[in-house]
Image (cartoon, rainbow, N blue to C red):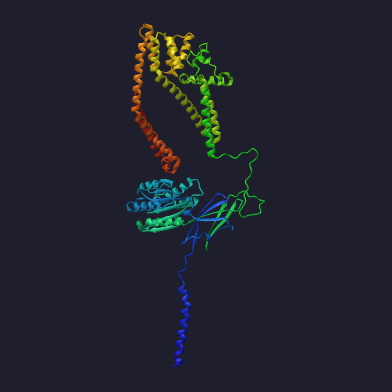
Amino acid sequence: MRRSRRPALLLLWLAGLLLLGALPALAQDDPEPVADIAITDVGIARYPEMTVIVDVGNVEAFDAADITVLEDGEVIRSLSATPIAQNPVPVGIVLAIDTSAATAGGTLEAAKAAATAFIDNMRPQDLVAIIGFGEEVDVYTAFTSNPTALKVALSQLEAVGPSRLYDGVVRAADLYEAVGGDATLESNLIVLAGSADTGSEATMEEAAAALAAQSLSVYGVALSGTEFDTTGIEALATTQYIATPDPGELATLYGDIQRSLDNRVVLTFTATEAAPRDVTFEVRYQAASASEIITVPGFIANLRSTTTLPPVYQVAAPEAGEAASPSPGTLRLISIITMAAAIALMVVVLGLGRSTDVVSRRLSSLSGRRFARPGTEAGADEESGWMSRIPFLSRFATQAEEVAESQGLLQPIANMLEQANILWRPGEVVAGALAVAAVASVFVGILQNSLAVGAVAFVILVLVIAVGLKLVAAREKSRFIDQMPGTLGLLATSLRSGQSFLQALEAVASEAPEPTSREYQRAVAEVRLGRPIGAAIRAIAERMDSEDFGWVVMATDIQREVGGNLAEVLDIVADTMLQRNRLRREVKALSAEGRISALVLGGLPVFIFLFLFTSNRSYLEPLINRTAGWIMIGIALGSMLTAFAWLRKIVNIEV
């Protein structure tokens, strides 16, 4: 009996040993997934400061302490690693969507919904562009971070024609090339294909070459339920390829891609290689590693430094007398200040030609040089402005006057100077304006290093000076017309008191406000020097370009020739002008709303365009980068000008 039990006991003992040996293996959990890592972007624009973006996969929680960067096998110690979701580095994403006839209906609508959800979850600093490839390859919006603009672009997608997958991929690569190769913009492309390429001009090899040239990370999504040849989309998807038969799963797939983008890590460090050459940079995370050979530009290092970590840099000191170039903002500020100073200088110089002591100014000209109209030979030759006393400037002013006269501009300029009470010859004003504008524009062009900017500054300065003179002349004329009823009343009162007409003019010259007193002082001075009274007051009407005062002169001449009560006539004319001025002001008040509406409606589109052009230029790129957009701009400008002229005609009521 004992012998029969021994084999059984031995078997039990062996089974127990096997069970004990298997317990540790049974107690072990499933093996942890092995992390994988890939370098998606390398930025050397600010070398030796480098930015490397890596994609870390199969990791539940990223630990920055486990990542290492090696430069030609040497560990870099000045390393900073942050998830891209916590880093301001912008991510560029092109959503290329198949808009061929194969995606018509629910497929395209599902693609729009998935892209909309993707846009809602993107970071504020990310830049997204939308391309549709069907019968045509259209860029519905260039890179922008504006969700509203992107959603509007998605709503414009329409399914028509054959698929042009390869042409769409090449167009996406061109978008990144147009950005200018910005090293801080990580390049990604998400392609949704619903059918095989049947209409592209580019080949698959050309599309792959375009992607490689821009180092794009391509995510390919194929709707395999349509049973098409997915060889092309699979070959182009360098980062990830996903296929699904159900369009309803597109939102989930886009969400997975977005999470993959958010799992990327931004590495910043300082490289130590000073010489321009190829350097191998290797990134290690746990047991995974990825490497890439980068051609670095090098830098100027301090060769006498004995420390290598961190590296020491030496910038060549400027030579004696060499100053650092100012920044573009400083140049713009200097240009603005220069233009403002030029305008102020011209205003001051013109102001030197204005005088309030009219009597002494006129009586000093015993030769009668001011009797002639400014700009005519008699008046122009006898002027003695400060330019006339300098030979070079005198010749310049004379030539400028001859050019202005040949163009028919001399007399209008002379009239404007008379109204503005500026004692300059027209040639002196033209020469002074051109000289100030030329000097200031040359200075601005040198600062901006642009001939075109200098030319634009010259034109702007000349226009500003001309408009300034016209405004001064218009203000003086308006003041003279508003004072005319009171002036006529003062003349009539003086005549009733028994004074002669010349004494009445002297009373107005001494008691009336400017500019009326100034003009009447000039008329009195001219009469004392022998000019007829009628010609003297007629010259006032010509200088001030006043039609109303011309009627007064006509009535005065008639009454003085045929006789009658001139005081009563002047009272009637003064009352008529007073009523006209009152009616004119009432009409101006009633039409103010229309004028303001014209200004607002005319200026608002321009203001909005300039605001968007400076704040979000990418939003306007589809408008300014297409021929159709320029046609629309031209039509809009033509319509605005027509409407503005129409409104001006409506509210411009002559009284």
Instruction: Please state which of residues 143 and 200 is positioned toward the viewer in this rendering.
Output: 143
Quadrant position of residue 644: top left
Q: Position of residue 513 (x, y in %)?
A: 44, 19
Q: Quadrant of the N terminus?
A: bottom left
Quadrant position of residue 442: top right
Drawn side of residue 270 relative to residue 87, left or right: right
Quadrant position of residue 605: top left
Which residue ends up furthest to the front in the rendered image? 497
Q: Position of residue 235 (x, y in %)?
A: 45, 56
Which residue ends up furthest to the right in the rendered image? 304
Q: Position of residue 163 (x, y in %)?
A: 38, 51
Drawn side of residue 654 relative to residue 371, left or right: left
Which residue ends up furthest to the left in the rendered image? 105
Which residue ends up furthest to the bottom in the rendered image? 1
Instruction: Please state which of residues 256 and 561 is positioned toward the viewer in this rendering.
Output: 561
Q: How many callouts does the rendering have?
A: 0
Q: Is residue 654 visible?
A: no
Instruction: Classify 253 as above or below 473.
Output: below
Instruction: Classify 531 as above or below 156.
Output: above
Q: Is residue 457 visible?
A: yes
Instruction: Classify 182 as above or below 468.
Output: below
Instruction: Please state which of residues 227 and 172 is positioned toward the viewer in this rendering.
Output: 172
Drawn side of residue 649 relative to residue 125, left or right: left
Q: Position of residue 206 (x, y in %)?
A: 46, 51
Question: Which residue corresponds to the image point at 48% horizontal and 11% vertical from the top-left?
Answer: 526
